[in-house]
Image (cartoon, grey):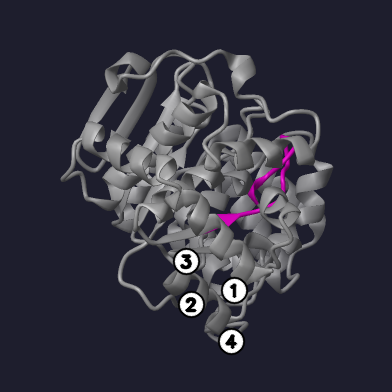
């Protein structure tokens, strides 16, 4: 259900006003959260020529976006999009920023089914691949699952399976208005940072993988302002998830710590053990093999590690990571994660 709410109350921009905004940026001034929200809504009404939108995104990329500016764009995307109301009190999203160019298999998506198999509620938000062979939506669609924005179907999925999938393009209407500019620019923009923040169901907790420590600081400040339970993970060698290829850093509402794979009783993985393969089919096969408990040990461990930190977030940090790892392992090795996936697929095909 479209909900372009309150837009008639918003100001309508003139070309001169946007010129003033751009001049302020040239003077290294920061924009307020309200200003970037209004700018985003103006973009959805096609009130700016493409040249001004291009200049805005370029300026923000060169200067670096602030927490309030990113939150304002988030507010605008959510307000101009389709909101999802789920009939449960608490659920988690597990997502990565993407852009690490490591072409890993769908670790976050697979971990979601392990978490759901353990009895937790999951509202997974995702899209097609941009820098890898297979994004979350690619692997979900590959299994014949149909994307939907029908609220009854979405609620049935999370109530009966413990998990619902929210395909970003059905909900974030604003993104199509900046699509042509983003494609024309030879560098990523601040809109590449928005994906993890615009889950239309507003989850109360989230596990986020980032590719850099700079992104970790930015998102940590964003989550603190949003007021949700979170864990942000980064593998020191540049993966936007817990790769187990070396040390990784985790920051949450409760602690900040660098882990070694051995701290979890897991062995160090080789980069080639994480690769998705050359095709979407190969990526999907790896996900299937993990859920069927026949994957390479490293592939299984990586999914378990990410699922464990997601479970710890859901539990508000009240369980140790060792406890959470065992919960994840039981979900996978008992077949509950696979059963959850099969039920989800049957319900959503």
Q: Quadrant of the C terminus?
A: bottom right
Camera-side residue of 120 and 60? 120
User: In the rendered view, does 249 fall on the left or right side of 66?
Assistant: left
Q: Earlier in the sequence, mark 2 or mark 4?
A: 4
> Given this view, does label 1 or label 3 mark the residue nearer the observer?
3
Q: Main secondary structure of the magenta part?
A: loop
Distance from disc 4 to disc 1, alpha carbons, whole Å, reads 12 Å
Residue found at the far left of this picture: 318
Which residue is under mark 3?
161
> Given this view, does label 4 or label 3 mark the residue nearer the observer?
3
Q: Earlier in the sequence, mark 1 or mark 2?
A: 1
Distance from disc 1 to disc 3, alpha carbons, whole Å, reads 29 Å
Where does residue 326 sit, x and y in percent of width and height? 29, 36
Using the image, determine if residue 7 lies above or below residue 311: below
User: In the rendered view, does 143 fall on the left or right side of 222?
Assistant: right
Q: Earlier in the sequence, mark 3 or mark 2?
A: 2
Distance from disc 1 to disc 2, alpha carbons, whole Å, reads 22 Å
Q: Earlier in the sequence, mark 1 or mark 3?
A: 1
Residue 80 circle label: 1
Which residue is under mark 2?
155
Number of labels in the image equals 4
Q: Which residues are magenta?
A: 124-136
Which residue is under mark 4?
8
Camera-side residue of 183 and 344? 344
Distance from disc 4 to disc 3, alpha carbons, whole Å, reads 39 Å
Secondary structure type for disc 3 = helix
Query: Magenta includes 52?
Result: no
Distance from disc 3 to disc 2, alpha carbons, whole Å, reads 10 Å
């Amino acid at each position: 259900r479209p909900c372009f709410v309150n837009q008639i109350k918003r100001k309508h921009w003139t070309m001169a006003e946007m010129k003033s905004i751009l001049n302020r940026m040239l003077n290294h001034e920061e924009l307020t959260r309200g200003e970037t929200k209004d700018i985003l809504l103006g973009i959805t009404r096609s009130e700016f020529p493409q040249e001004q939108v291009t200049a805005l995104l370029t300026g923000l990329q060169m200067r670096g976006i602030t927490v309030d500016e990113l939150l304002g764009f988030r507010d605008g995307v959510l307000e101009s999009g389709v909101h999802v109301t789920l009939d449960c009190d608490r659920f988690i999203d597990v997502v990565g920023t993407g852009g690490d160019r490591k072409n890993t298999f769908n670790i976050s998506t697979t971990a979601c089914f392990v978490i759901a198999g353990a009895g937790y509620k999951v509202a997974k938000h995702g899209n097609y691949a941009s820098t890898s062979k297979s994004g979350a939506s690619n692997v979900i669609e590959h299994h014949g699952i149909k994307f939907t924005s029908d609220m009854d179907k979405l609620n049935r999925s999370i109530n009966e399976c413990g998990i619902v999938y929210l395909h970003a393009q059905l909900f974030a209407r604003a993104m199509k208005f900046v699509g042509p500019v983003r494609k024309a620019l030879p560098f990523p923009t601040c809109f590449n940072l928005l994906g993890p923040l615009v889950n239309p169901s507003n989850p109360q907790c989230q596990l986020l993988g980032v590719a850099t420590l700079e992104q970790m600081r930015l998102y940590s400040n964003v989550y603190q302002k949003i007021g949700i339970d979170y864990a942000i993970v980064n593998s020191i060698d540049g993966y936007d998830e817990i790769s187990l290829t070396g040390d990784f850093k985790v920051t949450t509402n409760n602690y900040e710590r660098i882990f070694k794979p051995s701290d979890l009783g897991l062995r160090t993985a080789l980069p080639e053990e994480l690769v998705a393969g050359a095709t979407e089919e190969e990526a999907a096969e790896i996900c299937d093999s993990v859920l069927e408990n026949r994957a390479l040990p490293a592939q299984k461990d990586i999914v378990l590690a990410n699922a464990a930190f997601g479970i710890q977030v859901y539990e508000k940090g009240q369980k140790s990571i060792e406890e959470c790892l065992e919960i994840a392992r039981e979900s996978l090795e008992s077949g509950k994660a696979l059963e959850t996936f099969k039920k989800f697929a049957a319900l959503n095909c």
